[in-house]
Amino acid sequence: MSIILPEPGSDAKGAARPAEAPIYIPAEETPHLHKEYKGILRWLTTVDHKLIGVMYLWFAFFSAFAGGALAGGIRAQLALPILTDGTNATMGLNAGKALLSPELFNQFIGMHASFMIFFAIIPGFAGFSNYFVPLLIGARDMAFPKMNAFAFWLLIPSALLMICSFAFGSTGAGWTGYAPLSTRTYSPNIGVDMWIFGIHLAGVSSIMGAINFIVTMSTMRAPGMKWFKMPLFCWTVLIQSWMALIGTPVLAGVVTMLLTDRLIGTGFFDPARGGDPLLYQHLFWFYSHPAVYIMILPGFGIVSHIMASFSGKHVFGYKGMVYATAFIAIIGFLVWGHHMFSAGMEPWLRAYFGFMTMLIAVPTGVKIFSWLATLWGGSIRFTVPMMYALGFIGLFTIGGVSGVFLANVPFDVQVHDSYFVVAHLHYVLFGGSVMTILGGTYYWFPKMSGRFLDEKLGKIIFWCIFLGMNLTFMPMHWIGLAGMARRIYTYRPEFLDMNRLISCGYLLMLAGGIMLLGNILYTLVAKKRTAGNDPWGVNATQHTLDWETKSPPAPHNFDRLPKIV
Amino acid sequence: MFKDKDIRNLVAIWVVGTLLAFASAALVYSFYSPAAPGGSPTETSPITNWIFQPSTTVAEMVRVNTAWTVAVIFPFLFAPIITLLYIIGRFNEKNNPVPATFHEHLPLEVFWTIVPAVVLVAMAVPAYGVLRYMEKPPTKPDLVVDVVGAQFYWQYTLPKYDVTVTDEGDGKDPLVLPVDKAILLNGQSFQVNHAWWVPAFGVKFDVIPGRINTSWIRTKREGSYKGQCAELCGTLHAYMLIHVNVVPEKEFYQWLKKKGAKFPPEEQEYVAALLGEDVTATALATSTTTNH
Ligand SMILES: [Cu+2]
Ligand SMILES: [Cu+2]
């Protein structure tokens, strides 16, 4: 694919104009140019997709620290537990002496997950999507810029509701909020209702974002950019948006049913009133399995760009990548039952869900092999974003393989709700999603800010996070197989050493995260803007539009709308 | 497009690496041999699991099936990782200054779509055999146990003998089961969800209000087994520990007798002969009163 930037004498629609005349930008395409404030007001009122994207990224970054702090509480408790070996357990009596009370511990695990999912990973990708989808398709902005801003600002009350719920006793039922534990009988705190409202707002935000991306990519691609000329990142965001659009209403529905059960006694999940607790699980996972792909697909897109860029090649099997992503999305909606293998279901259903889950390994394998073929024969530059992309392949492969094991029903029954599952999901969500977000941060930072993050320090940070991640989550496979359940605030003495090791891994990751925050702040404040249009020098091969405009781009993105041939 | 030498090197490293990994895994595994004689777990030994101490028929089948899964899937774990490491060493700026230009190869793409699919079938077929076995409880079990999860203890009822024990998580009143018997477990709950999980038995089932989840085991080995609740059920979830002693038949009946069992008439003679004591209802009534 190649890009033609029209001669200065003509605009995209071909009308001739003098070379030095200002470019006419149709007002309806760039509403943020209507009125421009300065300073903080500029951020508060902006409808520019780039500023909104940056706000999403900051929001995600700080949420990741909040979620990470909660994880720190969990790891501290598990490194210094009051042990129980079943012979001297004295029930609630020694609970008060623990670092975290069991109530608080359960709130921590629920909020850690809620924060990381709804406020760190999903908005993190939303940030990149907002910033780069319009750039990559050669558009001036999103299709609905005001709705775009609204979707972002909804996240603030959503996060506030969840944070404040701690003051009222937040949900102790985990992020999954299984009924009946989350019903009023067993969780009377209004913190649970606040958590539900928080999910509502995050859900509305994510639905708005999804609609916006679908419409933007369907209608605003630059002239000549056919569907199959759209860069892979856009494809993954498009498919992710469809998933969010289909899945999120179901999540909103199920938490609403829980809310009405709690507040007005509808009894959807109460067997005494004709309800069924298992219904909650079916509806919840109908969203929450696809949510896994909502949280990883844009990452697939990001690493595809990074790997092609720094190996000096094109992405291998572009169309195969698109089809594989779409196939993952479709199958992703048909496998939710694999979270419920021990919950009791028809024998043939267990067989079906197991089979479909294995099937997902096929397109996922296609993606991994295609990435490797992208790298094969390349001339790799080990920049920091590339290191995250390479690390991602290794970690995501491990997460994928443990996922195949979990599709094996007899095996899954053994490790379900054990630390094995905790290990698996963190290899996918940390080794997958977070690594790609960090890779994307380094890759596009020069474009977004005009400045380079420090490469040397970046490598140190990478190794802290990469090694810390493995130190934290690899031993979890083992203690899970050995019989340690998840979501417990104390455990048998035989798991003590491993848990302390795991907590050390956490400290390593924390060190990496703090250095990264410091480096980003320092770079923004103290470094000069040096980045040109194509700061990494990759676009001679890549021909993507993000590198065809200034760093950072002007509010209207392109002085002349590009044409794709 | 692909330089033959690189492909050959890679395949050689992959084959040798995979074989080495399997060999060392087998070595480690045999080092921790599960079938060590006299290896019955006691009350003070660490928790046991289905990998090293499979103690039911299901657990044994899951162990074999998992070994098979490892054998077919792990080469696919090593393949990308070894390829990645090879690429890092071989195709970097220094060793390969001019990047290749290929970005398509249909036969290759078809190949890596089909091969994993075939391997997955090889993994799925035996797994479904185990699944069928797990899901077919014996029509005439030797013993039925109703397992009730509650906040925060486990209650077991043996309806045939009218015996109920409560495991408060402290191991003082464990469930006792006879060895080498088919046991049907009916899981129920009347409050919130829990999950009954004993790793060495290869069994886990959620207990959910409004339904009965059935599972079954055939005990194979004596010993004290440990498990715990595996579904978040509230503040003291961590303390819902499970204790099960698997004992010879005679001890099992002694335990029943101690618990004040009402032996069904057709069993009384057999039990009396086994224990050398009278276990009719009247005899038990007197003996329990005198014991107090
Ligand atoms: Cu899932
Ligand atoms: Cu529990």
Image: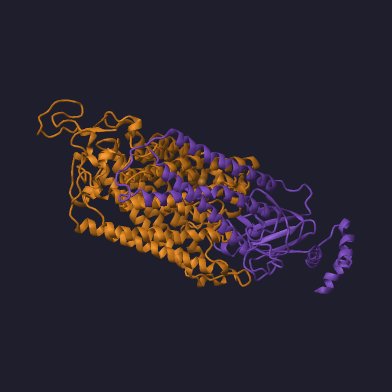
Residue A250, percent across and down? 48, 41
Residue B134, compared with residue A515, is above or below; it is above
Query: Which chain can be seen in orange?
Result: A
Colour scheme shown: by chain
Residue B115, compared with residue B263, is above or below; it is above
Residue at 54% from the left image edge and 47% from the top image edge: A404
Q: Quadrant of residue B259?
A: bottom right
Query: Which chain can be seen in purple?
Result: B
Asked whether the viewer can see residue A326, the reply is yes
Q: Is residue B113 left or right of residue A155?
A: right
Residue A67, percent across and down? 40, 58
Q: Quadrant of residue B272?
A: bottom right
Specify the farthest residue to the top: A15
Q: Is residue B282 left or right of residue A119?
A: right
Residue B233, percent across and down? 57, 58
Residue A23, percent across and down? 15, 33
Residue at 19% from the left image edge and 31% from the top image edge: A6
Screen quadrant of the N terminus of chain A: top left
Say which of A506 and A255 sits in front.
Answer: A506
